[in-house]
């Protein structure tokens, strides 16, 4: 069953988010977390859970969170033809539940919510080092339009 998460679901949402981050550790340094960052990450998720322009959908069965998707609506400059961007962010299905249609249901819930909020297009980013995810999103109708590129310019430590 698809549910809209609320702040009381923080433990389940955080557990899935951590699983997603761990899966992406080998893809690029941008997915790596600082040591002892759990509270900061939980606070970030709580902000999203409370944001009226963000919705976290979970697939819950038998009190187990088996997957989730984060969807947000953002307004672009009004001069653009497509000025109400729907954005799908973190998406994960626990490995043992993949291939059972859960991802399709979560994406459908996110798309419906985004279009109800006025989205005229939906964007997302997917790691180029995750071919399974690329195939999933292409089956959902998404197509590459730009190449998101990253240059890490520091080691992440501050110099005094």
Image (cartoon, rainbow, N blue to C red):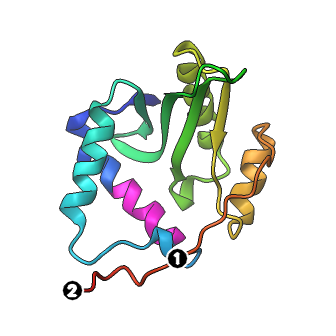
The residue identified by callout 1 is 152
Any magenta on residue 38?
A: no
Q: Is residue 138 left or right of residue 111?
A: right
Q: How far apart are marks 2 and 1 (CA)?
A: 19 Å
| Pointers 2 and 1 in contact (C-beta within 8 Å) | no
Any magenta on residue 18?
A: yes
Residue 84 percent across, percent down from the top left: 59, 23
Q: What element carries label 1?
A: loop
Residue in the image at 37% along x and 62% along y: 18
Residue 34 percent across, percent down from the top left: 30, 75
Residue in the image at 61% along x and 53% along y: 98
Residue in the image at 41% along x and 31% along y: 54
Residue in the image at 56% along x and 26% along y: 109
Mark nearest the camera among 2 and 1 is 2
Residue 107 occupies quadrant: top right
- Quadrant location of the C terminus in the rendered image: bottom left
Q: Magenta-highlighted stretch: main secondary structure?
A: helix
Residue 69 percent across, percent down from the top left: 50, 41
Q: Residues within 10 Å of mark 2 (few under 14, many from 20)?
A: few
Q: Is residue 48 above or below residue 112?
A: below
Q: Which of marks 2 and 1 is nearer the N terminus?
A: 1
- Label annotation for residue 35: none
Q: In this view, does 35 lie above or below 4?
A: below
Q: What stretch is highlighted in magenta?
A: 15-24
Q: In this view, does 147 lie to the left or right of 111?
A: right
- Label annotation for residue 160: 2
Residue 127 percent across, percent down from the top left: 65, 63
Q: What element carries label 2?
A: loop
Q: Residues within 10 Å of mark 1 (few under 14, many from 20)?
A: few
Which is nearer the eye, 15 or 134?
134
Q: Is residue 87 above or below residue 137?
A: above
């Amino acid at each position: 069953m698809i549910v809209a998460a609320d702040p009381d679901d923080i433990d389940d949402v955080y557990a899935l988010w951590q699983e997603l981050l761990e899966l992406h550790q080998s893809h690029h340094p941008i997915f790596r977390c600082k040591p002892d960052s759990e509270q900061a990450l939980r606070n970030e998720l709580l902000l999203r859970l409370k944001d009226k322009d963000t919705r976290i959908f979970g697939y819950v069965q038998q009190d187990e969170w088996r997957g989730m998707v984060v969807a947000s609506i953002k307004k672009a400059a009004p001069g653009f033809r497509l000025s109400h961007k729907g954005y799908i962010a973190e998406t994960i299905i626990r490995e043992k539940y993949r291939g059972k249609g859960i991802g399709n249901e979560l994406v459908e819930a996110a798309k419906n919510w985004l279009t109800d909020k006025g989205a005229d297009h939906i964007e997302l980013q997917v790691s180029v080092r995750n071919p399974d995810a690329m195939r999933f999103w292409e089956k959902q109708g998404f197509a590459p339009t730009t190449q998101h590129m990253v240059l890490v310019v520091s080691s992440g430590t501050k110099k005094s």
